[in-house]
Image (tube, helix red, strand yellow):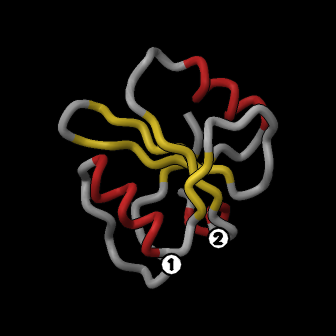
Amino acid sequence: MGKYINVTVAGRPIGPSYISKCSAMLSMGAEEISEPNEWEEGLVCCVKNGPIGALAFADSEEEMIVFKQTEPREKKWFLLKEARELAK
């Protein structure tokens, strides 16, 4: 499911919670967007997994579709130009 983002552009660790991951995206200048219909470079999805969150770069249209088909967990979508470089 994509490549995870666990550090900021400054190299600082991002906390494990859904809220901390979404906040980190915004502090890095990411644009929060509605669920996408088309893939574009820099697409990131944050998924709420109970008390933790998963922040992952959707590196292709296929990955975007997988995120969209995931069971109905809470999600936020972002665009971040540095996503590919941050994803591991």
Image height check: is 71 above or below 13? above
Q: Is residue 13 left or right of residue 27?
A: left
Q: CA distance from mark 1 to mark 2?
A: 7 Å
* Circles 1 and 2: CB atoms closer than 8 Å: yes
SS at badge 2:
loop
Residue located beneath label 1 in the image: 9
Mark 1: which amino acid? Val
Residue bearing the label numbered 2: 82
- Element type at mark 1: loop
Quadrant where the image shows the N terminus = top right
The label number, if any, that marks residue 52 in the structure image: none
> Label 2 neighbourhood size at 10 Å, few (<14), some (14-19), many (20+)?
some
Residue 32 or residue 84, whichever sits in front: 32
Residue 69 in the image: state x and y as whole percent: 59, 18
Residue found at x 42% / y 80%: 11
Return the x and y of residue 73 as percentages of the image width and height: 39, 24
